[in-house]
Structure formats: structure tokens, C-alpha cells
Image: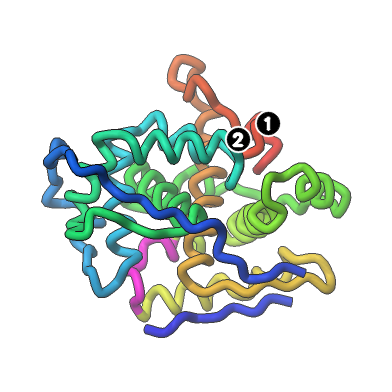
Amino acid sequence: MPDVMIRLAILPAILGAALLLAAGPAAAQGRFQVDPQSRFLHQLDHDHPRTVLLAFAECLVEEEPEDVLELLEWESLSEPAAELIADLVDSGSYSDCLTYSRQPARQMTMSERAFRGALSEVLYYRAHPSGISPALTSLEPADISQQDFVDRIAGAASSTEESLVLFGHCVVRHAPEPADNLLRTDIDSEAEAQAVEQLAPHFGGCLWEGQSIQLNIENLRAIIAQSTYLIANDIEQRRAPPSERFSDSRNSNGRPPESRS
């Protein structure tokens, strides 16, 4: 299925820094136990690269959960995020996960945005396999002021990525059920395209006058996945007993989670 270009009502369509992730010559061989019921393995199809990335992400979530969680708490394209990605690449789990996702070339190339989106989608789905997170069903729209928007962009490692985070958070807060529905569709399916159409009416209200972005369906899904996971996880963490909270709960700007959602 061709890319679906979404033109919203002043941001360029930048894919983000490309990551070439390659396994070393002494790659470990499959410590990860394959779950025959895995949704992401069931969808795995090398003719659809996004399904490969999701299977790869599922393995990393299982093998390196602490590093994955910490990566998603740091700002995109920041130094701490780059260091965590390097640690993941150097780990034996990384090589195992190339095997798990059936990568004969022993390497993958992706944007950090796509990588974050895949990790977020796996984490969200594994936490809520049967339906939308209860944390999202009582969400109220929360619009950010223009000054807060300007401040967030000015302080970000990447103004483009931070703008997209703010856009994604806004869309999810205004349309949590359609966002959840998108993440439950098969990659490159008609259902996925229809889910995007259901979300589309909420895009314009999440942009400032004169602002526009262009996203293909891959990047839109990644942005929505990251925002859906971050918002749901933030609320769930705040509701959980202190002993059950992630001990290093920073958001992607290194600020308290509530300042992002």
C-alpha cells in the first residue's frame, strides 16, 4: 500500500536521524524464547518492513526492559538517548533480536522516531492486549499554551521531534479511542488506513494557525504509539503504589512526567 501523506494545516516532514544497527561477528544465538501467540511475530512479513521492526522491538522489550523504558523517558535525539541506543546495539540481546525478527543481513536501518514508536507500541499492547488502557478512557483534552509550546521547542534537542511529540500528545488526549484503535490494526492494512481517517478530524485542532506538517502513515503511527504509551504509562505510574513505580521515572525532557502529558 502506498504511503498515505497527511497534510495538516511550519514543520517539515523530516524522518529524523537514521540508525544503522548491525550485529557483531560473534552474535549470540537466540536466548529469547519465542512466544507462539505473539501478535508481532504473527504479523512478521519481510515485504512489510514495519512488521519486522515491531518483532525486533518486542524482543528488545523482553530482553532489555530497563534500557528500553529509560530510552523512552529521554528526549528524542538527546545525548542520553544516543548513549542508550549505543548500549542496546552493543548488547548480546541486540544480536539475539535480529535473529528473533529473522534478519538474515544481521542489520537494520531505521529512524530513531520509528524505533521509539515500535518500542512504545509493543509496550502499550503488551500492557493492554484486550482493549484501551483504562487510564485513557477518562482523559480530558489538555491544550498547551502558545508560550509553553515555544518554551518546549526552544529547550528541545530537536525542535522537529519535540513539535511532533506535542502534536501526538494533543491528538491522543482529544481522541484516545481512535488512537488505541490505530495501534490494534495490522500494518499496511485497509483497517490501518481507516483508523487514520478516524483520527484525521482531530489533527487540525492540534496545530497553531499557519502551522503544517507532512507525515506518512509510518511516522504518524510511530508518533501516536509513543504518545499513547507515554500518556497511559504516566497516569498508571501516578496511580500505582510507590513500590511499583519505575524508579527512574523521567520524561523525555528529563522533567517530571506530568509536565509532558
Q: Of all residues shown, which one is farthest toward the bottom?
A: 2
Residue 66 place in picture, x, y as percent: 39, 29
**Residue ID at (72%, 64%):** 206
Q: Circle 2 — which element?
A: loop
Residue highlighted by disc 1: 255
Residue highlighted by disc 2: 251
**Residue ID at (57%, 72%):** 215
Residue 147 place in picture, x, y as percent: 88, 49
Q: What amino acid type should be assigned to the residue bearing mark 1?
A: Arg
Q: Circle 1 — which element?
A: loop
**Residue ID at (47%, 24%):** 246
Q: Does 110 sit above or below residue 4?
A: above
Magenta residues (range) = 181-189
Chosen colour scheme: rainbow
Quarter of the image where one finds residue 59 = top left
**Residue ID at (44%, 54%):** 19
Q: Is residue 248 magenta?
A: no
Instruction: From the viewer's perspective, tell me whether residue 191 is left or right of residue 56.
Output: right
Q: What amino acid type should be assigned to the residue bearing mark 2?
A: Asn
